[in-house]
């Protein structure tokens, strides 16, 4: 007996306990509704998705070709369409493909204050609300697709086609859900460690099995690709990692995954000088990076100056007028390595190193150093739209060719973004490097997960611009028909039938379950959705 048939039998047993009182309830309809709502709570989703990430991490450790990927989304519908497309194009499989929830996009697109910069000034409640919204849309995608399978099953039975009936039952029993892991951005925790814990619980309750936390100061947090970043001492960051772990364990998500992000490579400031209890402890190691002037005479210490000991020296720290303390120049890489090792040895599962450019060699150099202390260290890497990928990789190729003695006189390094270079040998070589970047970084630089933070922000802007240009121009309605609707139909996009996508047919099924032949359904012959075949 298949799982589907067993579920029907179980539902029938439940109904039978109440004799004729429940005679109107159909066991197969109950089974269908149960399968269409597999995940009853966000915690069910968090446990399920956390276990997926854990298994993917093990698979990656065996073979780095098994790296994972995600695209950032800012709305449930965008997430839904992404996962429907993945199942459509990759034989129904969602394996190794996640979603990313970007704090940048929440700030820019979801705040009640309107568009905001990525500085943790949007409502913290918007984060768990978006997680819940995304999973609501993904569950609805399951319900819709299963409904189509149920319709196919009914048709096979009506036709007396037992072979087709068994084939559809097999598809139902082995159904691949659209629900996949979300790596959810909790920024710098939106406050102290208690605030981080409380928000983490809300995010986990909404379905997050993986949370990403960064080591910036919460109340002056900046986008990782902007200036003015201020980091916290390790003791403060580890307290927040502990807070997230406690939240996972309290909520019963024992496999919850924590991504520890370091912004130290581009951060030159600290807000706080930690207290060192003994030479060589974490605070002492952190303070060793603080910039300052060696003093031997206390008369050189003025009002408001802060003096610390670095080894055998007394240092008057370099402080800005706002009280922030500067790190020594060119110490970012060393601070990143210490951050990563410390985080992995104290509760984090994965690393995120925010860099200023996409360069496999740079990432690998940092990861190699981390792996001296933690051999299985793995990264989540931001394939950010904040990088100009074209100019970066063309310049990388230019520099490699120059070092190898290859003639580059046909190119101007600072002008390589120009379209006149698009068909050149250098541009082709650069595009080849972009195409293999994720694969190369997974193999050489320990990148377990590649994500793009803001792709759907940019695709929405581009597609809207093109449609507006032509629709309001000479082409009028043809711009929509030719470039949108006709392509949707011919590419087999599910949302071409937008009534079905919005749940109209699912609602019709429920009406029929509840009201029988009296049900007033929307899917009759006059529904224009029938024009789409």
Image (tube, helix red, strand yellow):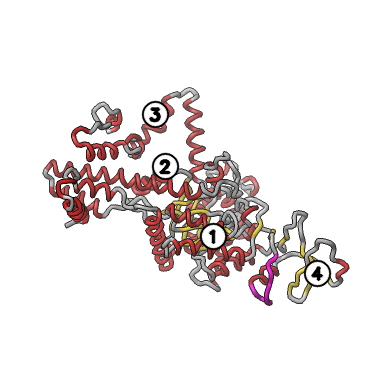
In the image, residue 226 lies at what x, y percent?
A: 64, 50
Query: CA–CA distance between discs 2 and 1?
Result: 27 Å
Q: Distance between the residues labelled 3 and 1?
A: 43 Å
Residue furthest left as drawn: 160
Q: Is residue 203 left or right of 240 when viewed as pictured?
A: left
Q: Are marks 2 and 4 in contact (CB under 8 Å)?
A: no
Residue ID for mark 2: 77
Residue range (magenta)? 273-281
Q: Which residue is drawn at 80% across and 69% down?
A: 294
Q: Nearer the viewer, residue 273 or 333?
A: 273
Q: Nearer the viewer, mark 4 or mark 3?
A: 4
* Residue at image mark 3: 481
Magenta residues: mostly which secondary structure?
A: loop
Question: Height in image: 493 above or below 229?
Answer: above
Residue at 26 percent of width and 40 percent of height: 510
Quarter of the image with the C terminus is: top left
Residue 511 falls left or right of residue 276: left
């Amino acid at each position: 007996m298949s799982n589907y048939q067993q579920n029907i039998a179980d539902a029938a047993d439940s109904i039978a306990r109440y004799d004729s009182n429940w005679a109107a309830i159909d066991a197969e309809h109950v089974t269908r509704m149960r399968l269409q709502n597999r995940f009853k709570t966000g915690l069910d989703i968090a446990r399920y998705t956390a276990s997926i990430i854990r298994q993917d991490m093990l698979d990656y450790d065996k073979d780095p070709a098994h790296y994972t990927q995600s695209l950032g989304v800012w709305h449930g519908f965008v997430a839904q369409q992404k996962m429907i497309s993945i199942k459509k194009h990759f034989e129904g499989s969602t394996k190794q493909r996640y979603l990313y929830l970007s704090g940048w996009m929440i700030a820019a697109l979801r705040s009640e204050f309107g568009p905001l910069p990525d500085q943790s000034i949007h409502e913290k409640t918007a984060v768990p609300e978006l997680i819940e919204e995304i999973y609501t849309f993904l569950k609805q995608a399951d319900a819709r697709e299963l409904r189509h399978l149920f319709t196919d099953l009914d048709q096979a039975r009506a036709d007396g086609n037992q072979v087709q009936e068994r084939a559809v039952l097999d598809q139902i029993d082995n159904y691949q859900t659209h629900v996949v892991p979300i790596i959810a951005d909790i920024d710098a925790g939106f406050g102290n460690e208690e605030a981080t814990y409380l928000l983490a619980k809300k995010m986990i309750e909404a379905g997050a099995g993986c949370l990403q936390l960064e080591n910036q100061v919460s109340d002056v947090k900046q986008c990782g690709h902007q200036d003015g970043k201020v980091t916290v001492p390790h003791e403060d960051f580890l307290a927040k990692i502990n807070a997230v772990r406690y939240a996972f364990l309290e909520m019963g998500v024992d496999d919850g995954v924590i991504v520890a992000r370091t912004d130290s490579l581009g951060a030159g400031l600290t807000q706080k000088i930690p207290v060192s209890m003994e030479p060589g402890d974490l605070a002492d190691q952190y303070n060793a990076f603080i910039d300052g002037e060696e003093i031997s005479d206390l008369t050189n210490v003025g009002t408001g100056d802060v003096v610390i000991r670095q080894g055998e020296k007394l240092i008057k720290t370099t402080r800005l007028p706002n009280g922030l303390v500067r790190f020594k120049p060119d110490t970012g890489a060393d601070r990143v390595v210490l951050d990563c090792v410390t985080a992995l040895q104290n509760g984090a599962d994965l690393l995120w190193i925010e860099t200023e450019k996409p360069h496999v060699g740079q990432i690998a150099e940092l990861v190699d150093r981390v792996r001296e202390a933690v051999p299985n260290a793995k990264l989540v890497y931001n394939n950010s739209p904040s990088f100009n990928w074209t100019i970066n990789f063309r310049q990388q190729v230019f520099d490699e060719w120059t070092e190898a003695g290859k003639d580059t006189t046909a190119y101007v390094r600072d002008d390589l973004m120009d379209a006149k270079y698009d068909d050149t040998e250098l541009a082709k070589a650069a595009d080849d490097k972009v195409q293999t970047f994720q694969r190369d970084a997974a193999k050489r630089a320990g990148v377990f997960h590649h994500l793009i933070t803001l792709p759907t922000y940019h695709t929405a802007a581009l597609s809207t611009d093109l449609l507006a240009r032509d629709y309001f121009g000479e082409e009028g309605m043809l711009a929509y028909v030719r470039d949108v609707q006709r392509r949707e139909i011919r590419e087999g996009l599910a949302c071409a039938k937008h009534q079905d996508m919005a749940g109209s047919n699912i609602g019709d099924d429920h009406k029929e379950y509840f009201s029988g032949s009296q049900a007033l359904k929307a899917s009759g012959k006059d529904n224009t959705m029938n024009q789409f075949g």
